């Protein structure tokens, strides 16, 4: 068990895929948690290898009142290098799920 806000016990670029299911929703359920999201995103980004993908699964309606849409949250988190792409998988909202794929540039330094 690790705290993504405080720092994960993995080396930089350790994983080709980081799968997040519900953790961001939990942070976004309160204003206090929402303030921690950029740190958690940056830490997940740090352990992601160049060319890797961060996959985020979410239930619609989990954003705190007045929050930015999820794609904007990824783009505004200060990820370095910036994401190559942020894509929402089509067809899932009607099934009660949203899924986002955030790709780290292949030429990202480790």
Image (tube, grey):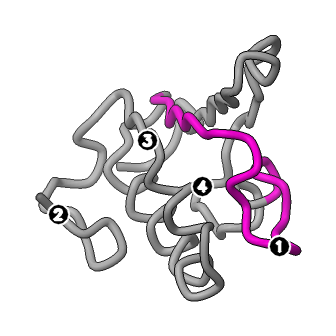
Residue sitting at 55 percent across and 38 percent down?
A: 56
Is the C-beta separation of discs 4 and 2 under 8 Å? Answer: no
Q: Is residue 67 magenta?
A: yes
Mark 4 crowdedness (10 Å alpha carbons): few <14, some 14-19, many ≥20: some
How many numbered marks does the figure carry? 4
Q: Secondary structure at mark 3?
A: strand
Residue at mark 4 to residue at mark 3: CA–CA distance: 20 Å
Residue 105, position as x, y percentages in the image: 59, 36
Q: Over which residues does the magenta segment extend? A: 52-72
Q: Earlier in the sequence, mark 4 or mark 3?
A: 3
Question: In the rendering, which numbered label is found on residue 2?
Answer: 2
The answer to which quarter of the image holds residue 75 is bottom right
Measuring from the top left, give residue 97's x and y in whole percent.
66, 27
Q: Earlier in the sequence, mark 4 or mark 1?
A: 1
Instruction: Decide: few, some or many residues near mark 3? Use Cα within 10 Å; few <14, some 14-19, many ≥20.
Output: some
Q: Residues within 10 Å of mark 1 (few under 14, many from 20)?
A: few
Circle 1 is placed at which residue position? 65
Q: Which residue is mark 3?
A: 20
Query: What kind of element bears circle 1?
Result: loop
């Amino acid at each position: 068990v690790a705290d993504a806000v405080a720092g994960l016990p993995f080396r930089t670029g350790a994983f080709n895929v980081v799968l997040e299911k519900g953790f961001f929703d939990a942070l976004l359920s309160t204003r206090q948690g929402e303030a921690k999201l950029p740190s958690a995103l940056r830490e997940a980004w740090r352990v992601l290898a160049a060319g890797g993908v961060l996959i985020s699964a979410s239930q619609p309606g989990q954003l705190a009142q007045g929050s930015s849409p999820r794609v904007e949250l990824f783009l505004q988190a200060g990820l370095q290098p910036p994401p190559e792409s942020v894509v929402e998988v089509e067809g899932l909202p009607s099934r009660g799920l949203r899924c986002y794929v955030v790709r780290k540039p292949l030429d990202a330094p480790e």
